[in-house]
Amino acid sequence: MWGAVVMIATAASTLVPHTGSSGGDDAAADHPASDQRRKKRGEWVYTFPVSGPNVFYPRDHLDYPAADLTGCRQLVRAPISGVIHTVRDIDKWDAKVDEPGTRGGLTITLHGDDFVRYYFSHLGRLMVKPGQRVASGQKIGTVGTSGNARVTLCHLHFGVSRICPMSEQNVRRGEIWPQPYLDAWKQGVNLSPNREVQRVTKKTPTACIEAAAAQRRGGDS
């Protein structure tokens, strides 16, 4: 789908009391979703993506929007129901080469039911497979040191973006700042990034195509 950008369904970012998991050890959230249908807007439930106490994430991130969450070896959970799109289960990063597309190490990409893409990298353990449907709050991995986190700090890179036809790194790594949404989810509030992702998509409609072209020139994703 190269002639057009993936359409994002219209949905308002609303503050709704959260009735789902907020990142704790809710046993019900540990199991795969029995409901295999896509959740509608009124059913979207958001979960803070790292379990455990004292999880910290700075308000900034290098030169593009994303969040790095601490919590080494703690559980990573799906922030919303959706389908696992891609899983990289081999850490290809080589410090001598430092290829940008491999810096994330072990990664997971989730296409949320809110028509938003969520990207997790530097994982330690992977608990899902491509094509698998997951529930909000379901375990998908652990915070680790794969990729260049081997030489930095154990953390989870969390990126939020539009859904593109390909898994091009320059978009999937993060288009909007996740911090306001992480703050809300941590407090048990269902604040959706859908509307902000729509605005970014309308403002830069060719971003997917441009990022894919840059990736082909630069190598691995």
Image (spheres, rainbow, N blue to C red):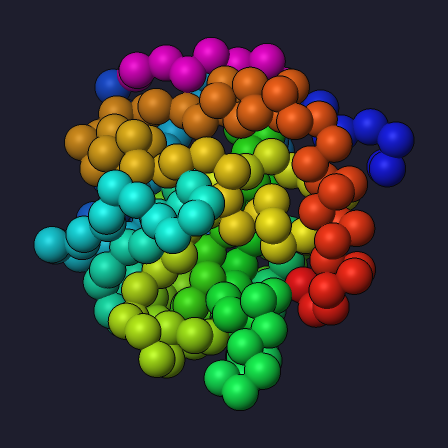
As for residue 10 lying within the magenta part, the answer is yes
For the question of whether residue 161 can be seen, the reply is: yes
Above-or-below relation of 106 to 33: below
Above-or-below relation of 192 to 71: above
Q: Position of residue 7 (x, y in %)?
A: 71, 24
The residue drawn where x is 24% and y is 54% is 51
Q: Quadrant of residue 199?
A: top right
Q: Nearer the viewer, residue 88 or 2?
A: 2
Residue at the left extreme? 54
Q: Position of residue 115 (x, y in %)?
A: 59, 30
Judge from the rendering whether residue 205 lies leftward or rightward of residue 138; answer left or right. Answer: right
Q: Quadrant of residue 111?
A: top right
Q: Nearer the viewer, residue 203 or 155?
A: 203
Number of marks present in the image shown = 0
The residue drawn where x is 11% and y is 54% is 54
As for residue 51 lying within the magenta part, the answer is no
The residue drawn where x is 46% and y is 56% is 120
Q: Quadrant of the N terminus?
A: top right
Q: Quadrant of residue 208?
A: top right
Give the magenta range. Answer: 9-16
Q: Quadrant of the C terminus?
A: bottom right
For the question of whether residue 44 can be seen, the reply is: no
Residue at the bottom extreme? 96
Judge from the rendering whether residue 14 lies leftward or rightward of residue 22; answer left or right. Answer: right
Q: Nearer the viewer, residue 95 or 23?
A: 95
The secondary structure that most of the magenta stretch takes on is loop
The residue drawn where x is 60% and y is 50% is 170
Q: Position of residue 68 (x, y in %)?
A: 32, 54
